[in-house]
């Protein structure tokens, strides 16, 4: 209530300041303190837990006697946005009609200070407010704020072009007004794409504004070549247009004229042979548009195909590949990495050819990028080329996701296997050298490229046997990078191992000759141990038992490594042909680390516990049967799962996975495993009565109760458990045997005789 009252006072103060400025009373205290009032509102808005307050509709603790608190907060926010709109409108009028301002509190410097505070607050309203549900009433005023900021930005660009003596003295203030309120547009649009390439939707206010006719004037000015006549104008204008192209590329493509004008602007900037900085700006526009177009596929924004993209932009990129300036070449290479499969299909086919057999493909462009991976003059070029090759291979070769693709965005039929193998061999040969590069960024991107190649090829090999010896050859260099001194190299190596391992340890690719595989189990065991240590490092740091102090950056890297290691461990343990060849202790240690991730779910990052649960759940049935009676993994795993189920109720996103995993381990467990489960209750606590209720409510088979009852008769277990526990399970077991619907015959066939030779490839 105090925050709302203070906000109301500040809003009324701002409105009085607007009246002063409109009447030219620049010496009045309200106008004098306008920047401070705007700054105070900004600080208040940023410190309020708005998401909690506004999303608490219906919660008793947030409903006060004076009325509905969330509704009052929303109304206060709308009043504040209304006041900010008045401030922005007043500033727009002053900048437009009074180009030469007096000194003192009516000076250019004071107006600039006021505009900066106003733009900061306007940007906050477009980015930090929740707009879902009942809060959608905030979209309209926030959209008007973006629209008015765009008007001021557009006005500034137009007036800067006026060639008059009187305007020259004030152009600095008008230019600053355009720049200052241009930041509101940048904030409302966002980046459009995360560092990992995932699409980020434009804020609701910015989207509503872009869909409205009020944005057309802004788009027209942003696309015009006149906006980029001077170097300073070019950089500021490109920043704005690049954000539009990356966050909302559909704005550029919704009309053929817009796309053609955008192409002309890019050509104008890229064609400046006398200024490398201008060429870089032009390529930045092309790259932003291509990245935004690719990322927007996941949001199903594009409604039509754009075959003009290779025709419009690829000649600019191909020319830039030959530029003598490294930054120009880097931007061009990155842009090639953002092209879609349809683009490559039209680019790679030579005239009069319709097949993608290696001999029929125009490899000129791809070979140029492959060659750049070994460019000795600039490590940035090599790094960008490795990343682009990885993206290109994944885009061309990866099998289409038919179920998750929209009707207009489904990938076409992938390139043929011969093309994929030929391309993969070329990439592997180049990446083998790049992985040994002295520059860490090059090594990291080379491993990234190999991960994409292996991931795409695995999708194909599951449908048809494809042998690529070069992928297998590069496994050892990637494995060695687990000990690299650079954290990003290690992180990419961890994830890539999970993809390449399929071509090394899968029965389809592993030699059946024992002599050829003599050293492979040792390497496999060592690899599991290294990955387990990555998980253990993050867990020890989370509970404060790490042997060394981590910086924030190192701690963040350790979390990413643990997350990736959990997934790669799951892949390695799924190879039943290999797990039979290594010691039980290695498997047990590895599984225990995955179980610890679940035990510490309240402490570690949620992605770590989620990836460990996913990896455990996809392990084959044969692995659990292999572990039963031979190590204590299943017993500790069951204790972990029941402890998790007891704590989380229905609140966790991985609860369903944990329940499924519990049922799998229960089916594979024997009496010794249940003994270990009960004996570990002090280290891995769980409620036995709740476990019993869960077994009953989930209608578990009678043979599971038989094994539990047998374990409870063990001397070690009887010494640590109350007699009533054994009696409870024994009574239930007798009841299950008497039930006509339950008998030992309900035991699943693949577990009935403990035979481990059943379908090793079966994944749960």
Image (tube, helix red, strand yellow):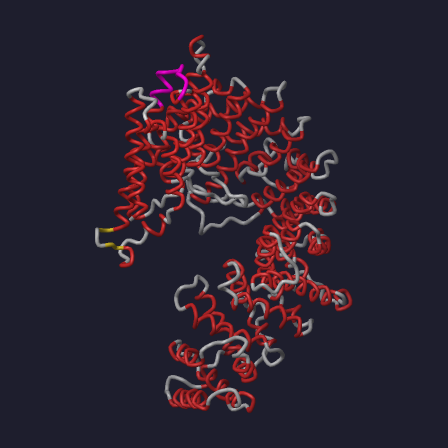
Left or right of 179 on screen, residue 759: right
**Residue, far right:** 515
Residue 128 visible, this orientation: yes
Left or right of 81 on screen, residue 169: right
| Position above or below: 664 against 98 | below
The location of residue 31, given as percent across then percent down, is: 34, 27
Residue 753 visible, this orientation: no
The location of residue 46, given as percent across then percent down, is: 40, 43
**Was residue 94 drawn as part of the magenta stretch in this picture?**
yes
Instruction: Give residue 351's quadrant in the image.
Output: top right
Left or right of 369 on screen, residue 26: left
Please name the residue shown 44% across and 52% down the image.
403
Q: Residue 463 or 321: which is nearer the viewer?
A: 321
The location of residue 763, given as percent across then percent down, is: 54, 66
Left or right of 129 on screen, residue 513: right
Q: Which residues are magenta?
A: 92-104
**Residue, far left:** 66
Please name the residue shown 49% across and 50% down the image.
401
Please name the residue shown 45% across and 10% down the image.
163
Q: Residue 760 or 711: which is nearer the viewer?
A: 711
Q: Residue 11 or 568: which is nearer the viewer?
A: 11
The location of residue 126, given as percent across then percent down, is: 38, 38
| Position above or below: 69 against 534 | above
**Was residue 732 drawn as part of the magenta stretch in this picture?**
no
| Position above or below: 557 against 180 | below
Question: How many numbered tags mark residues here?
Answer: 0
């Amino acid at each position: 209530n105090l925050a709302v009252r203070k906000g109301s006072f500040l809003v009324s103060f701002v409105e009085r300041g607007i009246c002063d400025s409109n009447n030219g009373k620049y010496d009045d205290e309200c106008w004098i303190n306008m920047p401070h009032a705007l700054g105070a509102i900004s600080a208040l808005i940023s410190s309020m837990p708005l998401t909690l307050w506004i999303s608490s509709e219906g919660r008793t603790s947030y409903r006060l006697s004076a009325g509905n608190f969330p509704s009052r907060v929303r109304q206060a926010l709308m009043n504040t946005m209304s006041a900010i709109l008045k401030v922005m409108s007043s500033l727009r009028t002053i900048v437009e009609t009074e180009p030469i301002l007096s000194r003192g509190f009516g000076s250019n410097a004071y107006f600039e200070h006021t505009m900066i505070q106003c733009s900061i607050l306007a940007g906050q309203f477009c980015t930090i407010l929740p707009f879902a549900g009942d809060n959608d009433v905030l979209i309209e005023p926030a959209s008007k704020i973006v629209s008015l900021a765009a008007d001021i930005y557009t006005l500034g660009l137009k007036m800067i072009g006026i060639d008059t003596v009187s305007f020259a003295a004030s152009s600095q203030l008008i230019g600053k007004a355009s720049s200052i309120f241009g930041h509101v547009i940048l904030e409302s649009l966002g980046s459009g794409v995360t560092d990992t390439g995932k699409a980020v939707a434009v804020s609701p206010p910015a989207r509503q504004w872009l869909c409205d006719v009020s944005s057309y004037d802004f788009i027209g000015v942003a696309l015009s070549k006149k906006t980029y006549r001077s170097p300073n104008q070019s950089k500021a204008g490109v920043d704005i247009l690049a954000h539009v192209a990356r966050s909302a590329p559909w704005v550029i493509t919704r009309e053929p004229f817009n796309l053609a004008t955008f192409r002309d602007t890019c050509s104008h900037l890229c064609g400046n042979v006398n200024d490398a900085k201008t060429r870089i700006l032009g390529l930045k526009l092309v790259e932003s548009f291509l990245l935004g177009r690719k990322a927007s596929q996941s949001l199903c924004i594009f409604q039509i195909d754009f075959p003009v993209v290779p025709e419009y932009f690829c000649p600019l990129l191909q020319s830039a590949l030959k530029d003598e300036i490294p930054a120009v070449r880097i931007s061009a290479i990155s842009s090639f990495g953002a092209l879609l499969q349809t683009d490559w299909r039209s680019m790679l086919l030579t005239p009069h050819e319709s097949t993608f057999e290696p001999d029929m493909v125009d490899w000129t462009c791809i070979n140029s990028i492959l060659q750049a991976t070994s460019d000795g003059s600039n490590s940035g070029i090599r790094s960008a080329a490795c990343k682009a090759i990885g993206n290109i291979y994944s885009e061309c070769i990866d099998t289409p996701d038919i179920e998750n693709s929209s009707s207009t965005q489904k990938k076409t039929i992938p390139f043929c296997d011969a093309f994929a193998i030929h391309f993969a061999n070329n990439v592997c040969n180049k990446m083998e050298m790049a992985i040994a590069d002295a520059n860490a960024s090059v090594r990291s991107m080379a491993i990234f490229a190999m991960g994409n190649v292996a991931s795409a090829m695995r999708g194909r090999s599951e449908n048809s046997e494809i042998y690529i010896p070069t992928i297998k050859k590069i496994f050892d260099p990637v494995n060695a990078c687990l000990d690299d001194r650079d954290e990003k190299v290690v992180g990419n190596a961890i994830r890539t191992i999970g993809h390449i391992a399929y071509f090394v340890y899968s029965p389809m690719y592993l030699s059946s000759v024992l002599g050829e595989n003599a050293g492979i189990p040792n390497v496999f065991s060592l690899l599991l141990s290294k990955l387990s240590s990555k998980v253990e490092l993050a867990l020890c740091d989370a509970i404060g038992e790490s042997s060394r102090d981590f910086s924030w950056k190192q701690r963040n890297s350790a979390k990413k490594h643990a997350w990736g290691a959990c997934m790669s461990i799951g892949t390695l343990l799924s190879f039943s042909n290999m797990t039979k060849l290594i010691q039980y202790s290695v498997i047990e240690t590895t599984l225990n680390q995955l179980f610890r991730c679940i035990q510490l779910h309240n402490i570690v990052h949620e992605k770590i516990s989620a990836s460990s649960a996913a990896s455990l759940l996809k392990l084959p049935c044969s692995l659990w049967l292999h572990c039963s009676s031979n190590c204590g993994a299943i017993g500790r795993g069951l204790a972990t799962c029941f402890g998790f189920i007891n704590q989380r109720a229905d609140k966790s996103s991985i609860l369903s996975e944990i329940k499924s995993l519990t049922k799998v381990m229960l089916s594979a467990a024997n009496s010794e495993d249940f003994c270990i489960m009960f004996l570990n209750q002090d280290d891995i606590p769980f409620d036995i009565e709740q476990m019993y209720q869960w077994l009953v409510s989930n209608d578990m088979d009678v043979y599971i109760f038989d094994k539990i009852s047998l374990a409870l008769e063990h001397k070690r277990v009887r010494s640590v458990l109350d007699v009533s526990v054994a009696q409870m399970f024994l009574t239930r077991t007798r009841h299950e045997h008497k039930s006509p619907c339950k008998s030992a015959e309900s035991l699943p066939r693949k577990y009935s005789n403990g035979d481990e030779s059943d379908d090793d490839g079966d994944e749960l």
